[in-house]
Image (tube, helix red, strand yellow):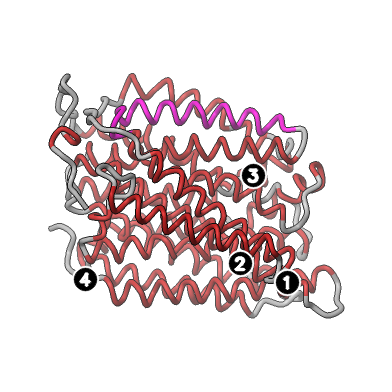
Amino acid sequence: MSSPSPAATGPHPHPHPAPDTSPAHLRTVLLIVVTAYLMVGVDSTVVNVALPAIQHDLGFSPTGLSWVLNAYTLTFGGLLLLGGRVGDLLGRRRTLTLGVLLFAGSSLLGGLAGDGGWLLAARALQGAGAALAAPSTLALITTNFPEGPRRHHALGVYSSTAGIGASVGLILGGMLTAWASWRWALLINVPIGLAVAFALPRSVAETPRHAGHFDATGALTGTAGTTSLVYAFIRVSEAGWSDPRALLGFAASAVLLLAFALVESRARQPIMPLRLFADRDRAGAYAGILLLPAGMFGAFYFLTLICQQVLNYSPLRTGLAFLPLTVVMFTTVRLVPRLLARSGAKPLILTGLALLGAAGAWLWRLRPGDGYAAGLLGPLLLLGVGVGLAMMPLSATILAKIRPQEAGAASGLLQTLQWLGGTLGLSVLVTVYGTTTRHAGPGTPAEILTHGASRAFGAGALIALTALLVTAFALTGRRTSR
C-alpha cells in the first residue's frame, strides 16, 4: 500500500491560526462538540421506548421493527469513514455544521412520517447526517486538546457522552412518548441542531483542509457490504437459515467486503487506511471498540420490550428503569481518567468487558416471573460500570500518537467500528431471538418473548467474552502517554 504523497496531506494554501488553548475557550469548544455528539448518541436509542407505539401506528412486524434502529445505525456506521474523510478535505467545523443541519432536517421529516417507508427513509438520512457530524466531533477534540491530561479529560467527558447518550435517549424517549407522542423523540432534534449549527462558526475555529479526493468506491463497497450482511441476518430471524434471500445477502456481503478490502489496500487515499492497524495496541483497541457495543445495543432493544410487554411498564416508567445504568456509568466515567493515569488502559478495558459478560450471563437466566429488582437492576448496574470502564480507555488507546492529518480517518474508523458493531450485534441478537421464538413451544406472549430475549442475552454474553479474549491477547499494556 502506497503512502499518501505530500500534496495529498499538505495543508490548504490559506493557513489557519493555531487553535486557542486557553481553559475558557477549550471549555466552550468541548461544550459545543459534546452537545453535537450527545444529539447523535441520544438518537441511537431515543426511539427504543417508542417502538411499541411506532409499531402500532405504522404497522411494523416484530422483527421488521428492528429496522427503525438499523436504518439509522447502518447508514451511520457505513458512511462514517467517508464522513471522516470529508472532514479532512473540507474542514471539520464546516463538515460538522453540514452534518448537524442534515441531521436536524431529517429528524423533522421522521417526526412527520405517515408510513413505515417514510420513517425508515428519514432514519437513513439521519444516519447520513450523523456520519458527517460524528468524526468531526472527535477529530476536533484530537486537534484542539494536546495529548496528555487535557486530552484525557476531554475524552473522558466525550466518552461519557457516547455511553450516557444511549441511556439518556431511553429516558428522554419514555418521557416524550408518554407526555406527547413518539414523534417528538425525533422532532426534539430540530431546535438543538439549529442551536449547535449557529454556535459552531462563532466559537470553534476551522481546521486546516487537506488536498485530496474522496474514496467513493471504498465507501460504496463498504456500505453495501455491511448493509447486505445486516439484511441477511434480519431475513434469517424472519424466515430461517434456508431462506434464499438470506443466503443471497450473505453471499453478496462476502463479495462486497472482499472488494472493499482490495480497494482499500490499493487506494492512494483510502477511507480506511490500513496503516492504522500497524500498531498492535491500536489494532486491539479497534477490535474491542467493534465488539463492545455488539451486545450492549441488543440488550437495550430487548430490555425495552421486556419492560413494556412483560412488566407492563408505561413508556415513561420504562425510560426511568434505565436511570440506574445512566447514574453508575456517569460516575464511573468521571473516575476513569485518574484510574487510567495510575494503571494504564488494559486493566480497565479487561475489567469493563468482564462486567459486560457477567451482565449478559445474568440476563440469560431471566424468567417471566422475575421482577425489575431481581431480574434487571443488577445487570443494568453491571452494564453501566462495564461500559464506563472500557469505552474511554479504548478511545484513548486508538487516538494516542496519531498524526494530525490522520485524526479524521482514525476517529472515523473508531466510530465506524463502534456503530457497525452495534448494528451487527443487534442483527445477530434479533436472529437468535427470532430463531428461538419460532421454535418455541406453547406459552403466553410474555413467556415466549422472555425465552427468546434470554437466549439473545446469552449470545451477547458470548460476544463480550470474545471481546475480552481478543483484547487480552492483543493489547500490550504499555502506557499511551505519561
Cα distance between the residues tagged 1 and 2: 13 Å
Element class at badge 1 = helix
Q: Residues within 10 Å of mark 3 (few under 14, many from 20)?
A: many
Q: Which contiguous range is marked in magenta?
A: 87-113
Q: Residues within 10 Å of mark 4 (few under 14, many from 20)?
A: few
Q: Mark 2 — residue?
A: 429
Q: Residue at x 33, y 42 (%)?
A: 138
Quadrant of the image occupied by residue 400: bottom left
Question: Which one is earlier in the sequence, the residue at label 2 or at label 4?
Answer: 2
Q: Amino acid at mark 3?
A: Gly
- In this rendering, position of residue 145 left or right of residue 443: left
Q: Mark 3 — residue?
A: 173
- In this rendering, position of residue 163 left or right of residue 303: left
Tag nearer the camera, 1 or 2:
2
Residue 109 can be seen in this image? yes
Q: Residue at x 60, y 68 (%)?
A: 377
Cα distance between the residues tagged 1 and 4: 40 Å
Number of marks: 4
Q: Amino acid at mark 1?
A: Thr
Q: Residue at x 19, y 41 (%)?
A: 404
Tag nearer the camera, 1 or 3:
1
Q: Mark 1 — residue?
A: 450
344 in magenta: no
Cα distance between the residues tagged 1 and 3: 23 Å
Q: Position of residue 240 (x, y in %)?
A: 71, 69
99 in magenta: yes
Vertical placement of 393 versus 415: above or below? below
Question: Which one is earlier in the sequence, the residue at label 1 or at label 3?
Answer: 3
CB of mark 2 within 8 Å of CB of mark 4? no
Q: Mark 4 — residue?
A: 477
Question: Which one is earlier in the sequence, the residue at label 1 or at label 2?
Answer: 2
